[in-house]
Amino acid sequence: MSTEIRVPTLGESVTEATVAQWFKKPGDAVNADEPLVELETDKVTVEVPAPAAGVLAEISANEGDTVEVNALLGAIGEGAGDVKAAPAKKQDAKKDEPKKAEAAPAQAKSEPAPAEASDDKPLSPAVRKMVEENDIDPAAIEGSGKDGRLLKSDVQAALDAKTEAPAPAPASTPRAPVAVEDAPREERVRMTRLRKTIAKRLKDAQNTAAMLTTFNEVDMGAVMDLRKQYKDVFEKKHGVRLGFMGFFVKACCHALKEIPQVNAEIDGDDLVFKSFVHMGVAVGTPNGLVVPVVRDADQLSLADIEKTINDFGARARDGKLTMDEMQGGTFTISNGGVYGSLMSTPILNAPQSGILGMHKIQERPMVVNGEIQVRPMMYLALSYDHRIVDGREAVTFLVRVKESLEDPQRLLLDL
């Protein structure tokens, strides 16, 4: 008797993933709950554990295949590693799992998914759903599947062409010719689903929002002295180090209460104002930038914020963040200073209307009370959507953040 391996629920609004890699091959012994296969969505990577102990008897979805939620990935048979490898059978998999996503285009040409009639072209359930959701006429798209059937890749190509039509030419401009002697020294790597999603969303933010950036600088001396004085007792009591990010989150939450436009978003012809702060904290990982969200950050203590961020950072590097943990943010903080950045203009995380860029702390000569002193200074950058936030509001927001950091007691007194 075999146990099926299926695609788990991937999170809100996520219906499909790409099979990134199998950790086992057919015939290998597996233990219950041992990671078997890694799936890549447009936001995170997800490891699918073995539902039972035994032998990996069959792989039904190969690396690179696109699969839907609950689609059949493979099967585990009884035994201890002596089962012969079984080839993937797309048609059998479809009988077992009617809702399985279409195979990659190359495989779909030879073994198309079951289709329904729509006008003069057959449509699979997945393709039909895609054209209906995007209000596309399937008769206007040329199918590349067998007998002219439409594939999801055909519909996606049509959507991309429609989206990119008004965009500037560079997005679709071919590469410049490469010298013959240089070609062997290049390496071509296909973009991951996460990287493609990051690229698309950042470009969409630039194309949609009226983005502008305002700058200021903050003397970090007061925060650094506070950390130095209390870091040991703080870590002993709360079990987490006292970092800079907690202070910035608190300072931004304080400023957002005064300037709610920076915590708002546009929905059609409406402005949506939030009476809560879900703070996105940008985290760099080997696979790209992810932004986990500290929910109700305005209601949390400094210790709770530090614990949450520390946990996010550790799990982000291991690819263990869940979909829910990266959705619903209302404002974002990005810390380029950890990589040595002295100044930058961060890009909005749509549909949010503001993002704060932190940078490297650098000692600089400053005039303080008529005297030149060496102070630990940091440049701050606030990128904002000028459709919602006026210049006065953006500058005021950044000044409030600066004031809170240079005099942390203001946060305690709600000033």
Image: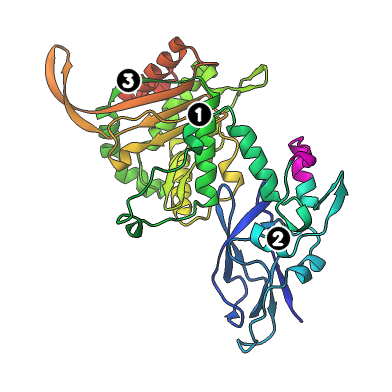
Q: Do callouts 2 and 3 mark residues in contact (Cβ within 8 Å)?
A: no
Q: Quadrant of the N terminus?
A: bottom right
* Residue position for label 3: 216
Task: Please say whether residue 292 is visible from this viewpoint.
Answer: no
Q: Can you say whether 163 is above or below 324 in the image? A: above
Q: Residue at x 74, y 79 (%)?
A: 2
The mark closer to the camera, 2 or 3, is 2
Q: In the image shown, does 331 or 6 lie closer to the viewer?
A: 6
Task: Please say whether residue 59 is visible from this viewpoint.
Answer: yes
Q: In the image shown, does 125 or 328 lie closer to the viewer?
A: 125
Rendered image: mark on residue 168? 1
**Residue 357 picture location, percent across and down:** 38, 30
Report the amino acid beneath label 3.
Answer: Asn
**Residue 109 picture location, percent across and down:** 71, 60
Rendered image: mark on residue 14? none
| Range shown magenta | 129-140
- Apparent side of residue 39 relative to residue 128 in the rendered image (left or right): left
Q: Work out whether mark 1 precedes mark 2 in sequence or the reverse, and give the earlier one.
A: 2
